[in-house]
């Protein structure tokens, strides 16, 4: 009888715990030392331990990389992802791990199935791979991302879009069955802006409705906590309105708790389109716009150039060259992060193309001002007797005087290269 009572009491306690307050999940739970937590894309095959330690020292808190099934047709090098995850942790970095297959949703070709289980569906094979990997590494990965740009034919063949919802549902079912509930699990790394009729970072065109429906279903079932997008665009400032449109569309679909993650966004320095100075300005402004929009996590593409051609866009997205030299974007952004650490957004204003982001750090206010093009005069308020220090970041960091007071503050000539005025006292 005592054993029966004990078992019953245990069952009641388990039931009470299961109906208690749900643990907070999603990107809203993320804490950071900075206005926006910054990540950078790495190549699992070439990243070194020295790289990882340098990334952390520079102010990045995350690194992002993709994981594929251990099958040679989609993962020829058979990368040791568990070892990489431990190396990332040892460098005091957090991991954003993107789970996707390869040539098809499930990452298998007929030849891969020789001697294997041919009875399981393609959706089940992807679900098993992803769920098994999440379960094995749940304690060591901060953010999980399901798929990468399924609206881009490079990552998902258009003929297979109709199967994507079934593959996602199968994964969500596996996670529920195994009681796997990651704190932050996002999807799907959209190349174009979903729910708002195309446009956005991925160029023209619209996200297929099947992919949008798959996301809504997974988010409503509490499988995915947040949406991840890739807001590539010619100038960063247009992202602010697109974030607002996306937020409204999520709310319209009763996804009010669903946060927005920019899981990939960068600018390449390639000739004759954009030199390193222009790349630096755009990447800096990209960070500032995400701070203005209240986006909690931004992944910058990427850590190191893929190749050495000065004329190839895809070769030159890095903030370091292929040989490891720091570009202007590296210097400007990391110097700013040193100043912006422990600061929080106060306000953002865009008046006739002149932007001003105000951050507070302790007793100081940090006013970052810039334009999208031509030089403009911008007024920065400061109380009588306040001290003002001007910080320029281009082409290299230098501190100096803000000049004479003008009216109720200081006036700065703003350009497309942001400048910071620190006001204290």
Image (spheres, rainbow, N blue to C red):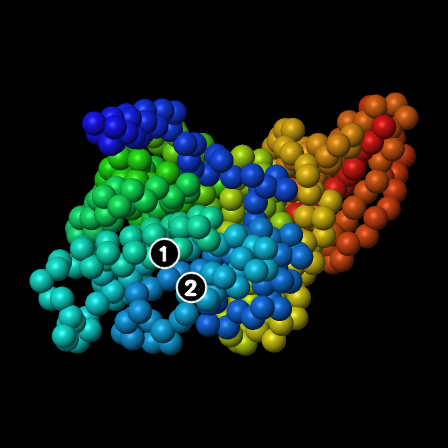
Which numbered disc flags the more N-terminal residue, 2 or 1? 2
Q: Where residue 91 appears, x then y in whole percent?
A: 59, 60
Q: Residue furthest front?
A: 1
Count of picture labels: 2
Q: Residue 184 carries which label?
A: none
Please give the name of the residue rendered at 25% of the width and 28% of the height, measured from the top-left corner.
2
In what quadrant of the picture does the C terminus appear?
top right
As measured in the structure, the alpha-carbon distance from the residue carrying label 2 to the one carrying label 1 is 9 Å
x and y, in percent, of residue 358 in the image: 68, 33
Which residue is tagged 2? 82
**Tag 2 and tag 1, C-beta contact below 8 Å:** yes
Pick the front one: 2 or 397? 2
Residue 83 appearing in the image? yes
Q: Give the residue drawn at x 68%, y 48%.
A: 337
Quarter-of-image position of residue 100? bottom left
- Give the quarter of the figure containing the N terminus: top left
Residue 319 visible in the displayed image: no
Is the residue 121 above or below the residue 109 in the image? above
Residue 234 horizontal side relative to residue 424, left or right: left
In the displayed orientation, state which residue is furthest to the left: 119
Residue occupied by mark 1? 136
Residue under the image location 25 percent in, 65 percent down: 107
Identity of the residue drawn at 38% across and 34% down? 258
Where is residue 270 drawn, in percent x and y?
55, 67
Q: What element carries label 2?
A: helix
Q: In this view, does 146 lie above or below 213?
A: below
The picture quadrant where one finds residue 377 is: top right
Reply above or below: 386 against 209: above
Q: Along the horizontal axis of the image, is 241 left or right of 109?
A: right
Give 128 or 221, whichever is nearer the viewer. 128
Judge by depth and name the residue closer to the eye, 55 or 325. 55
The image position of residue 361, as x and y in percent, is 73, 34
């Amino acid at each position: 009888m005592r054993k029966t009572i004990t078992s019953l009491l245990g069952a009641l306690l388990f039931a009470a715990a299961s109906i208690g307050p749900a643990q907070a999940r999603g990107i809203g739970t993320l804490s950071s030392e900075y206005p926006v937590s910054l990540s950078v894309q790495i190549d699992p095959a070439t990243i070194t331990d020295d790289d990882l330690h340098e990334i952390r020292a520079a102010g990045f808190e995350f690194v992002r990389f993709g994981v594929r099934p251990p099958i040679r047709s989609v993962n020829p090098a058979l990368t040791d992802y568990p070892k990489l995850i431990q190396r990332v942790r040892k460098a005091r970095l957090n991991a954003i791990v993107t789970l996707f297959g390869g040539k098809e949703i499930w990452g298998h070709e007929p030849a891969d199935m020789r001697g294997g289980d041919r009875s399981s569906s393609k959706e089940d094979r992807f679900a098993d791979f992803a769920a098994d990997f999440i379960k094995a590494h749940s304690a060591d990965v901060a953010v999980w991302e399901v798929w990468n740009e399924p609206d881009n034919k490079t990552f998902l063949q258009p003929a297979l879009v109709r199967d994507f919802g079934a593959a996602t549902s199968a994964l969500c079912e596996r996670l529920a069955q195994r009681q796997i509930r990651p704190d932050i699990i996002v999807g799907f790394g959209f190349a174009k802006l979903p729910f708002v009729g195309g446009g956005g970072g991925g160029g023209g065109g619209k996200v297929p409705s099947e992919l949008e429906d798959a996301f809504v279903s997974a988010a409503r079932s509490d499988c995915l906590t947040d949406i991840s997008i890739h807001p590539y665009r010619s100038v960063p400032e247009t992202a602010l309105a697109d974030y607002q449109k996306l937020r409204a569309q999520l709310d319209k679909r009763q996804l009010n708790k669903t946060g927005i993650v920019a899981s990939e966004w960068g600018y390449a320095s390639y000739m004759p389109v954009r030199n390193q100075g222009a790349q630096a300005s755009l990447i800096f402004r990209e960070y500032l716009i995400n701070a203005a929009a209240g986006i909690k996590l931004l992944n910058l593409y990427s850590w190191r150039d893929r190749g050495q051609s000065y004329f190839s866009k895809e070769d030159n997205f890095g903030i370091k060259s292929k040989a490891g030299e720091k570009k202007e974007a590296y210097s400007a952004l990391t110097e700013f992060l040193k100043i912006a650490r422990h600061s929080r957004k106060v306000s953002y204003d865009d008046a006739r193309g002149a932007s001003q982001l105000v951050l507070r750090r302790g007793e100081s206010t940090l006013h970052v001002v810039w334009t999208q093009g031509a030089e403009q005069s911008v007024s920065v308020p400061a109380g009588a007797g306040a001290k003002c220090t001007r910080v320029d970041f281009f082409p290299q960091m230098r501190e100096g005087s803000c000049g004479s007071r003008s009216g109720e503050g200081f006036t700065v000539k703003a350009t497309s290269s942001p400048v910071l005025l620190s006001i204290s006292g």
